Amino acid sequence: LLARGQIATCRSLGGRGVDKFEGVLWHTSAHGTPVLDGALATIECTIHSVIEAGDHFIVLGRVLTMQANDELSPLVFFRSAYAQVASAP
């Protein structure tokens, strides 16, 4: 899950191109998966099952590790724009 300050990372990973990780800071986890530096949260899973749903697939994962940074705010993309989450009163 990306943090509010990671718009460039979001654009890089979501855009078209050969190397989506070019310029993105990341490291490899103990499970061998890429972990984005500065992310709001990371959830590492293995595939538990795959369900066909018409022309889509629903992939259920078994969580291996999960970590979050409570000091960061999430990056939100809604209705074609980046937005901020309002703080709770």
Image (spheres, rainbow, N blue to C red):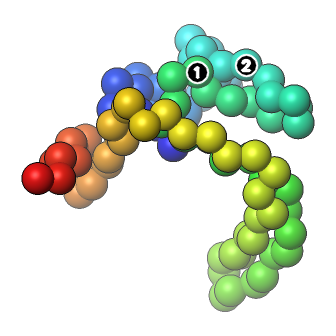
Residue found at x 85% / y 56%: 46
Q: Is residue 8 left or right of residue 56?
A: left
Residue 26 versus residue 80: which sits nearer the camera? 26
Q: CA distance from mark 1 to mark 2?
A: 7 Å
Q: Percent position (x, y) of residue 12? A: 50, 27
Q: Is residue 11 visible?
A: no
Asked which quadrant contains residue 30, the reply is top right
**Secondary structure under the numbered disc 1 in the rendered image:** loop
Asked if labels 2 and 1 touch by Cβ distance under 8 angstroms, the answer is yes
Residue designated by label 2: 27
**Is the residue marked by circle 1 packed among few (<14), some (14-19), or many (20+) residues within 10 Å?**
some
Amino acid type, mark 2: His
Residue 46 versus residue 53: which sits nearer the camera? 46
Residue designated by label 1: 37
Q: Is residue 61 left or right of residue 76?
A: right
User: Which residue reaches farthest front?
Assistant: 89
Q: Percent position (x, y) of residue 23? A: 56, 12
Count of marks overlaid on the render:
2
Asked which quadrant contains residue 56, the reply is bottom right
User: Which residue reaches farthest bottom?
Assistant: 54
Q: Percent position (x, y) of residue 83? A: 21, 44
Residue found at x 51% / y 23%: 38
User: Which residue reaches farthest top?
Assistant: 23
Dot 1 or dot 2: first in sequence order is 2
